[in-house]
Image: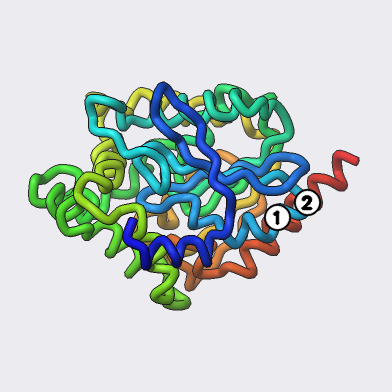
Amino acid sequence: MPDARARVVDELYPFESHYYDRDGLKLHYVDEGRGDPVVCLHGNSGWSFYYRELIKALRGSHRVLAPDHIGCGLSDKPDDDRYAYRLESRIDDIEAWLGALDIQENITLVMHDWGGAIGMGFAVRHPERVSRLVVTNTAAFLIPGAKALPWSLWFCRNTSAGALFVRGLNGFVFGWLLTGCRTRRLDASEKSGYLAPYDSYKNRIAVLRFVQDIPLEPTDPSFECLAGVAEGLSTLGDKPMLVLWGEKDFVFDHHVLEEWTRRFPDARVEVFPEGGHLILEDARDESINLIRGFLEAGAEESS
């Protein structure tokens, strides 16, 4: 990581780094505060940096944990011969990491983008350990039938030119930062923080592998895993859920939101009509206040 970007990360992301040894690979995570655990799971092409302000806001009342998936953020970025960049591997990682930390109960999951499939995959395996769910522009099921995969994702997923665009030109990360916020612009420091871990062809392997792992057909490697997660969502119907949704997200759009509300009709849904994919950036204060209130309501109910 270049020195200038490292300084930006230190300034905006002032947390102690922790590492979990995952079969010889370093999985980086933040672990701040004390209390019931709030586990924040990022997507592609983010990292735990996305949750920096939420961590600061909640660490006075909760133990807030935010990992970087293998290949992302400050975690190791191995080649394919060292790590299987598949959804099941991601769920296994979170399961092993939380097990090693002996976090066994009252977990609130906060999920974004791929973090939804990963987090709900863990929750379906261990519903007794999860108490509350926060869903933000994400999915944990196959693409709804009324929605097509956006052309830009198809291009990156299926073509050699798309792979070069993602890994060689860093086009996916730049595009994500350009379109992810709709009500404000990320400033230079914020952009630098997001870009910092993805500063070379080698370090962008997970960005491409996440896109390539989007399951569309039964023959796709992660199709069966995601279908199993989706089937298990019914076991989580009694969990309080807060949905925060930016409507200007062209990937996780109204079709995806409608699938969440169909599966979880009792969820509290807060829609931001002008918000984009990065809702914790686009509507930061509102989102943090809603999450804080959701957690406080849960604490009152259990007391």
Q: In this view of the protein, can residue 285 be seen by the observer?
A: yes
Q: Nearer the viewer, residue 56 or 233?
A: 56
Q: Amino acid at mark 2?
A: Ser
Q: Is residue 235 visible?
A: no
User: Which quadrant holds the N terminus?
Assistant: bottom left
Query: What residue is at 39 percent from the left and 37 percent from the top?
Result: 70
On the picture, is 266 further left or further right than 112?
Answer: right
Asked whether disc 2 touches disc 1, contact meaning CB atoms under 8 Å apart, the reply is: yes
Q: Which mark is residue 20?
A: none
| Left or right: residue 55 compared with residue 171 | right
Query: Image quadrant of residue 225?
Result: top left
Give the percent coordinates (x, y) of residue 117: 45, 37
- Please, what secondary structure does the residue beneath circle 2 have? loop
For the C terminus, the image quarter is top right
Read off the residue under disc 1.
58
Q: Write the residue at 47% across / 28% down.
A: 21
Residue 75: x and y in percent read 41, 41
Other residues around mark 2 within 10 Å, as few (<14) / some (14–19) / many (≥20): some
Residue 110 point in image, percent of width and height: 58, 46
Q: Give the percent coordinates (x, y) of residue 250.
A: 35, 60
Residue at left offset 26%, top offset 39%: 209
Q: Quadrant of residue 265?
A: top right
| Residue type highlighted by circle 1 | Leu
| Front residue of this view, candidates 246 and 84 | 84
- Residue 78 is drawn in which quadrant? top left
* Pointer 2 residue: 61
Residue at the far left: name it: 160
Residue 267 left/right relative to 263:
right
10 Å neighbourhood of mark 1: few (<14), some, or many (≥20)? many
* SS state under label 1: helix
Residue drawn 68% across the image and 36% down it: 107
